[in-house]
Image (tube, helix red, strand yellow):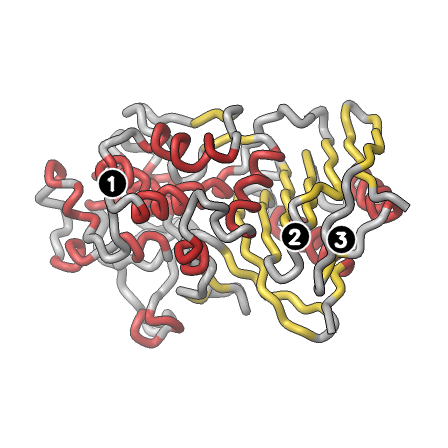
Amino acid sequence: MSMIKPVLLAGSVFLLPVTPAPAWSQSLDWSEESSLAVSQAVEADTYGTVTSLLVLSGGEPVYEAYFQDTDATTLHDTRSVTKTVTSMAVGAAIADGALALDSPVADFFPELMPFANPDPRKFEVTVEDLLTMSGPLECNDWNEFSRGNEERMYLVENWSAFFWDLPVRGFPAWQTPPEDSPYGRAFSYCTAGVQLLGEVVARATGEAFTDYAERRILMPLGIDALEWAMNGQGQAHMGGGLRLTTQALGALGELYRRDGADILPQDWVEASLAHHAAIPDTPGWEYGYLWWLMPYEVDGQRFWAAAMTGNGGNRVMILPDFGVTLVFTNTDFNTRQMHQNAQAFFETEIVARLQAGN
C-alpha cells in the first residue's frame, strides 16, 4: 500500500500519493489510517485550535493538513518559534567570522553607555549567555513582576537600551544560582536578550538582520514567502515575529535534522542541540542555543527531541534518532492549555507511532 498525504483545504480532504520515506533502523509507523485518525482528532478540537500540521519522515511528507481556513500559502504567526531563527543567524555570523560565542555583546553598543544600574558584569555578557537564556540581568518573561518582562520592553522605544538598563538579577534562597545549577547556568526566559542578540548580529555583520537572515538562511532554503513584524525604530521583532508558511517552518527544522545541509556548519548544529541549561519548573526539559530539548521514551529507550516553541502551542520539532520533523501551528494564544495540547499531540500522534530499532 502506498503512503498518503492528506491535505485539508477549505474543509475538504485530498489524498495525494507521496514517495515512501527511506528505511530507518528507528522509524515512524505511519499509514493512511494514521492520517485519517489525526485529521479526525484535530477536527474534534482534541488539540485546540490547530491551523496546520506537517509530518516529515526522512525529509518526505507523510502528512500535511490545513485547518481553520488556512492553506499551504498561509503565513503563520508562531510567536517565539522564530526565536530560533535568530540563533541560526548567529551560527551563520560565527561561520562568517563576524562573531564568536565568547564575544562580549556590550562592546557593540557604545552609544548606549553609560548603562543605567552600572555593574561590571554587564560587560561580561557573551553571545553564548544570550543563546542559552542565562545572562546575569534581571529579565524573566515568566514573571509578571520582572523588570525585564517583554511586555515592559514593548512599552519603550529603544529595546536595546531597555535591556542594558536592567539591574543584575538576584538569587533569593529558593532559587538556584548559576554556580549550583546544571551546566553552570541559571536559565531565565528573556525575549529582550534574544532581541538584543539579533541586533548584535546586525552590528557584527554590517547588514540589517532581516537582510542577513534572508540571505544566509531563508533564501538558500527556498523560503521567499515571509513577513517580518517591525517595531517603531524599524527593527524586526527578532525575539519571535517572523511569519512563515508551514512548509517553510518544516524546512527550518529539516535544516538542523540534516546537520546544517551545507548552509550552517555541522559543528554549529551539534552545539546548538547540545545541553547547555536546565529549564526550571519543567522537569526533564533542557535548553540548547535557543532550542528546547525534550526527553521522550520509545520501547523503554530514552531519546531527545529538539523544538522551536512559541505562544499558542506552536512548535517545530525534530527527532534526529527517527528522521522525523514535525510542524504544529495553533492560535490558542495565552491560554492555559496551549502547550499541554501541543505536548499531547506530540506524545499521542507521533511518539506512539515510533518504533525503536534493535
Amino acid at dot 2: Val
* Marking on residue 324: 2
Q: Look at the picture and state if 313 lies above or below 284.
A: above
Which residue is at the front of the view, 199 or 213?
Answer: 213
Q: List the residue tagged with mark 3.
A: 349
Cα distance between the residues tagged 1 and 3? 42 Å
Q: Which is more toward the observer, 66 or 205? A: 205
Tell me if residue 293 can be seen: yes
Farthest residue to the right: give it.
1
Q: Earlier in the sequence, mark 1 or mark 3?
A: 1
Q: CA distance from mark 3 to mark 2?
A: 13 Å
Disc 2 to disc 1, C-alpha distance: 39 Å
What's the residue at 54%, 32% (across, down)? 77
Nearest to viewer (mark 2 / mark 1): 2
Q: Mark 2 or mark 3, which is nearer the start of the sequence?
A: 2
| Mark 2 residue crowding within 10 angstroms, few (<14) / some (14–19) / many (20+) | many
Badge 1: residue crowd in 10 Å (few <14, some 14–19, many ≥20) = many
Q: Count residues near mark 3 (Cα–Cα under 10 Å), then give few for <14, some for 14-19, many for 20+.
A: some
- In the image, is residue 347 above or below residue 174? above
Kindly check if marks 2 and 1 are in contact, taking CB atoms under 8 A apart as contact.
Answer: no
Q: Position of residue 81 (x, y in %)?
A: 51, 43
Residue 114 horizontal side relative to residue 202, left or right: left
Question: Could you tell me the amino acid type at mark 1?
Answer: Phe
Out of 116 and 299, give the one closest to the viewer.
Answer: 299
Q: Mark 3 is on which residue type?
A: Glu
Residue at 72% in and 46% down: 47
Position of residue 297 measured from the top left corner of the image (x, y, whole percent):
67, 69
75 displayed left or right of 132: right
Q: Which residue is mark 1?
A: 162
